[in-house]
Amino acid sequence: VQLVESGGGLVQAGGSLRLSCAASGRRFSITAMGWYRQAPGKQRELVATSDDYSTDYADSVKGRFSISRDNAKKTVYLQMNSLKPEDTAVYYCNAGTIDHMTSKYLEVWGQGTLVTVSS
């Protein structure tokens, strides 16, 4: 399974960006998808996650970011509004997957996309 992210870039404070992450591969199901971020010199942190029952957000992005999924396309989106300089980070897509052949669970990460918010 591979995750390919897109949509990062440079934006001014107060602006918006939309990240996309598409999963591809053979014979797998997705249990959950989400976004994490890692700012320079900091640990990777959860931004938002979504499974079949609920969504969850970091307190720092509640009310500004929105996660959504297109299950048919195996794609997850992150709509980011009212961006702040402190949102600057590399954003990573994450997915929990089940291999149909082995029934094994595998957590997969994307390569990351850089979001830079200027003040």
Image (cartoon, rainbow, N blue to C red):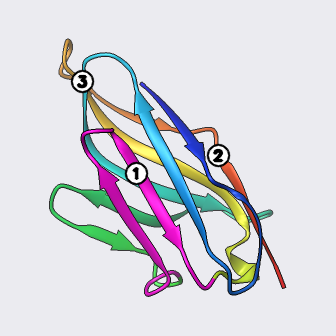
The residue that label 3 is drawn on is 104
**In front: label 1 or label 3:** 1
The residue that label 1 is drawn on is 76
First in sequence: mark 2 or mark 3? 3
Residue at the spot 68% in from the left edge and 87% down from the top edge: 14
Q: Which quadrant would the N terminus be assigned to in this image?
A: top left
Can residue 44 be seen by looking at this rendering?
no
Amino acid residing under circle 2: Gly
Amino acid residing under circle 3: Lys
Residue range of the region highlighted in magenta in the rendering: 61-82
Residue at the spot 79% in from the left edge and 64% down from the top edge: 41
Left or right: 108 with respect to 102?
Answer: right
Residue at the spot 62% in from the left edge and 75% down from the top edge: 16
The residue that label 2 is drawn on is 112
In the rendered image, the vertical position of residue 49 relative to residue 24, given as above or below: below
* Residue at the limit of the structure toward the right, as seen here: 119
Separation of residues labelled 1 and 3 (CA atoms): 22 Å
**In front: label 2 or label 3:** 2
Can residue 77 be seen by looking at this rendering?
yes
Q: What element carries label 2?
A: loop
In the rendered image, the vertical position of residue 12 relative to residue 73, given as above or below: below
